[in-house]
Amino acid sequence: MASNDHPLIVKSIPWVTEDDTQAFAAALAAKLQGTAGSHMLIALHGDLGSGKTTFVRHLLKALGVAGRIKSPTYAVVEPYTLDDAPGGALDIWHFDFYRFNDPDEWEEAGFRDIFASPGLKLVEWPEKAGEHLPSADLDIALELQDGDVRAVTLTARSDAGAALLP
C-alpha cells in the first residue's frame, strides 16, 4: 500500500473526448497487468458527472472484465476476478462511497479485510470513508471544464502509484 514518506508526484493531463479517457484507461491497464498478488488502491475524486464511473468501466474492460460493468452506487462495491490475468488471478473491487452518511459506515461494512487483501481497489468518493480508508497509491481527480473536457490531475503517493503515471 501507499507509503506516507513517499514524495508526491503530480501530473496534469486533459481528457478532451471520451476516446482520451479510454486511451488513458487502456494505458493504465497495461501497467496494471501482472500486479496480481500486490496491493493497489486508486482513488477517484470529482463531482457528479465528472466521469469517474465511465473511466472505471473503460479500465475494467481494458483489463479484460467481460460483460456488463455495473456502477456500485447502490451496492457500494462490485467485485471482479480475472482468472487469466498475467501473473495470476487478479481480484478487483470497485467501490462507490457516495451514499455514505458517516465515515464509520466503512468500518461497519467490514471493508477492512478487503483493503488488507491483495488486489486492485478502485474507489469513487474516497473522502466519504474518511480516515478509515488507507492512503491511495494513485489519486485521480477529474474536473469537468468547458464542454466535455476533463482536467485530470494524477497524484502518485507511493512507488507503485508512480509506476502507473504516463
Image (cartoon, grey):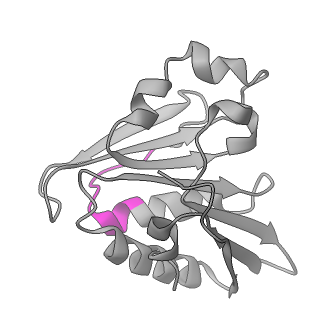
Q: Is residue 42 above or below residue 80?
A: below
**Position of residue 3 measured from the top left corner of the image (x, y, whole percent):** 55, 56
**Position of residue 14 measured from the top left corner of the image (x, y, whole percent):** 70, 85
Q: Is residue 126 visible?
A: yes
Q: Is residue 125 visible?
A: no
How many numbered circles are shown?
0
Q: Nearer the viewer, residue 77 or 136?
A: 136
> Does 138 lie within the magenta span?
no
Q: Is residue 21 above or below residue 63?
A: below
Q: Is residue 88 above or below residue 8?
A: above
Residue furthest out toward the front = 5
Direction from residue 102 to residue 89 in the image, left or right: left
Q: Quadrant of residue 109?
A: top right
Residue furthest out toward the right = 146
Q: Main secondary structure of the magenta part?
A: loop
Residue furthest out toward the top = 108
Residue at (47%, 83%) from the top-left corner? Answer: 23
Q: Nearer the viewer, residue 162 or 75?
A: 162
Residue at (41%, 31%) from the top-left corner? Answer: 114
The span shown in magenta is 60-70
Residue at (49%, 33%) from the top-left corner? Answer: 77
**Position of residue 19 measured from the top left corner of the image (x, y, whole percent):** 54, 83
Residue at (29%, 55%) from the top-left corner? Answer: 65
Q: Nearer the viewer, residue 27 or 38?
A: 38
